[in-house]
Image: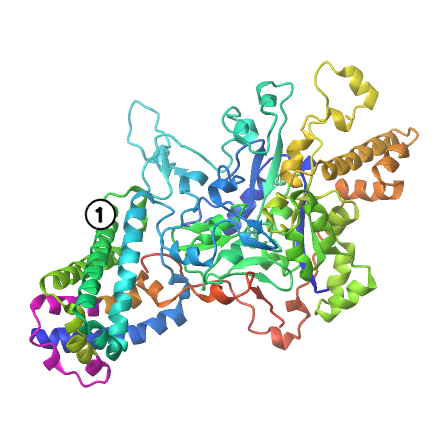
Amino acid sequence: MDVRAQIVMVFNLDKCIGCHTCSISCKNIWTDRKGAEYMWWNNVETKPGVGYPRHWENQERFKGGWVVDGKSLKLKAMGKGPTLLNMFFQPNLPKIEEYYEPFDFDYGNLAGAKAGDDQPTARAFSQISGKPIEEIQGGPNWDDDLSGSQIYAAQDPNLQEKQVIDSYASMFMQYLPRICNHCLNPACAASCPSRAIYKRGEDGIVLVDQEVCKGWRFCTSACPYKKVYFNWDSGKAEKCIFCYPRVEGGQCNACAHSCVGRIRYVGVLLYDADGVEGAALKGDAELVQAHRNLILDPRDPAVRAAAKKNGISERWLDAAEKSPVYTLVKEFGLALPLHPEFRTVPMAYYIPSLSPVLSTWGDTHKLLEHGMIPALETLRVPVGYLASILSGGNREVIEEALKKLIALRVFMRSANLKKESDSAALAEAGLDAAAAKRLYRLFTLASYDERNVIPPQQREEQDPERRKQQGGFGILKKTGRGR
Amino acid sequence: MLNNLIFIALPYAALALVLLVTPYRFLSNRLTWSAYSTQFLERKFLFWGINPWHYGIIPILTAHILGFAFPGLFKPFLGNQQTLLLVESFGLGLGLFALMGCLILLLRRVNSGMLSRVTYGSDWLVLLLLVFQAGTGIYVSYFLRWGTQWYLHSAVPYLWSVVSFNPQLGYVAELPLAVKLHAAGAFLIVAVLPFTKLVHLLYLPVDFLKDPPIPYRWRTK
Ligand code: SF4
Ligand code: SF4
């Protein structure tokens, strides 16, 4: 058993209101720079939809992630020899148009235009070429709130029941906020010929070393989530850094901190590094269970001993015990990995959504029957759809999680209305009253410190004299072409 | 005069620049050490330029370097007329391939939409130098036959005399002008190398061939 620690984020999709505050706080801090205008390390997309970049889930187009090859894993795109031969022209690289051509508006013209008969306008211009754009062709949330659903939502590869799009009565929609998953088996890192992408041993954050990256661009397509971006100015790859400068200081990520819906939880998971490859080799339907098996119980004395032997400190173990992520992912099995079948063993987990909660118009008798909370069978979101996104197609794990969420609601509603509390549904879903209270608190009232349990980094735990001169003022050197 | 410029001043200037500026750039700001790919912004023409260029130039450059490093190895091998002919025609083909590539790369920059934002003086300089170099190379190999052979007996001993700081112009003084221009181009390319994106060729991305797939970095270990 090789115990390692990983900082993980959980997203409760039921609570995301699609406000994009997370994206904006991330952009303002990290990607408000030349060459990075089009990058959204955190983005929020509407599902069903094609997402950002368009069709990122289509691995026949981008060849991201891993595939099982007999008894081992190999990158879907290409092996090492072809990597050398495709260095000059990387065939799977996403095009800028597949993200969007970044634009701004010429606001100066509103004040500076010459006097005339017409109201001056602020025309859109490209942030790359600087030339005016007659018709904007895309944006980071182009199909937001199902706009253009006949084009975009209809192309969502997870949606088998295409007919739901045609009728407002059957249509559903939910938001999917995405960051880099800081995977246990990151395809981005494996694809890099320069070895610029690495996983930090202590907390599992995956970073691109800007000094080592030479811009070979294999990572941009190898990441099945399209979370490595090519900076067209610096000629290097960039990605979500899990706000490590904040996390090292014990603060949560900017996206999680600013989240209006308070849908995000950040905490530590302990996992067995020896089991990662074996887990990724499992069949699609067994992947969620394989993820759960990898995650170790921080209260288990054997795990604690092995963790200490690996240099994981007492404070980290404490944090792992209090981790809301452990509670949601392993203890209750509510949070599920995003597209585990890409086999990068992603470490961002999603609690599937029950929304829209109310049943369709005309079904009032059904509503009464279920006490305003729909039964699993009446949810508008097809279970198969969620399974395609969150469980490698395994409907059981989705149903299990949804049943728990429904039972929790039924129980809390009856408790709040001072009726007899309904623990029968709880028991059937595998919960008890104490668990329900804990989950209820985590989902609703939990304070910042309950939602984000972030232990101090080794940096803080080292002797001060060892820390000296290791800090700094960030990167002062200039990047970019023409220098 | 021309000989002194091309065969003494230029090579030593180039050598000095490459030996001093390269480590300086490496140590002072590796953030500018990139292949500066533009594929993200334009790929239609790039495909027809960048692939022929690299697939053409890499074997040719390697042959030049190997010939310089181990001349003894090639002399007997090239003594055979048939082998020589084969090598020459193969080289000429690769050269034409490379020339086509870098011409396309050059033209691609001319009327280029988004590319204009990432095109700087150094890009023009490098592309023009490369076109010039490929052009003179092809001229030499077509009109001044058997270069593979006489390269080993003229340029190679001269280059060795340069690196041993005892330049012997005798080996090269009487060579035709085209060859001299080809040599001058080579020295110029070496000279601008540390200042431009050409630095990417000093780094061979081969570490990943032997490494485990996922690199880890530990602060504490
Ligand atoms: S999500 Fe993509 S970029 Fe992030 S670690 Fe996984 S493979 Fe790499
Ligand atoms: S800030 Fe929170 S609620 Fe708003 S879009 Fe982002 S994840 Fe959703």
Residue in the image at 66% along x and 38% along y: A393
Residue B177 forms part of the magenta stretch = yes
Is label 1 in a helix, a strand or a loop?
Answer: helix
Q: x%, y% of residue A252?
A: 65, 53
Chain to which the residue tagged by mark 1 belongs: B
Residue A432 forms part of the magenta stretch = no
**Image quarter for ligand 2:** top right
Is B4 located above or below residue A381 in the figure? below
**Residue closer to the observer: B76 or B93:** B76
Q: Residue furthest right?
A: A420
Residue in the image at 30% along x and 57% along y: B55
Q: x%, y% of residue B1?
A: 6, 76
| Range of magenta residues | B160-188
Q: x%, y% of residue A295?
A: 73, 55
**Residue closer to the observer: A254 or A109:** A254
Q: Is residue A77 left or right of residue A442?
A: left
Q: Mainly helix, strand or loop, the magenta region?
A: helix
The amino acid type, in three-letter code, at marker 1 is: Leu
Mark 1 CB within 8 Å of ligand 1: no
Is A324 located above or below residue A470 in the figure? above
**Residue closer to the observer: A192 or A407:** A192
Q: Quadrant of the C terminus of chain A?
A: bottom left
Is A113 located above or below residue A303 in the figure? above
Q: Quadrant of the N terminus of chain A?
A: bottom right
Instruction: Determine crowd level at label 1: few under 14, some 14-19, many 20+ residues with C-alpha closer than 10 A.
Output: few
The residue singled out by tag 1 in the image is B107
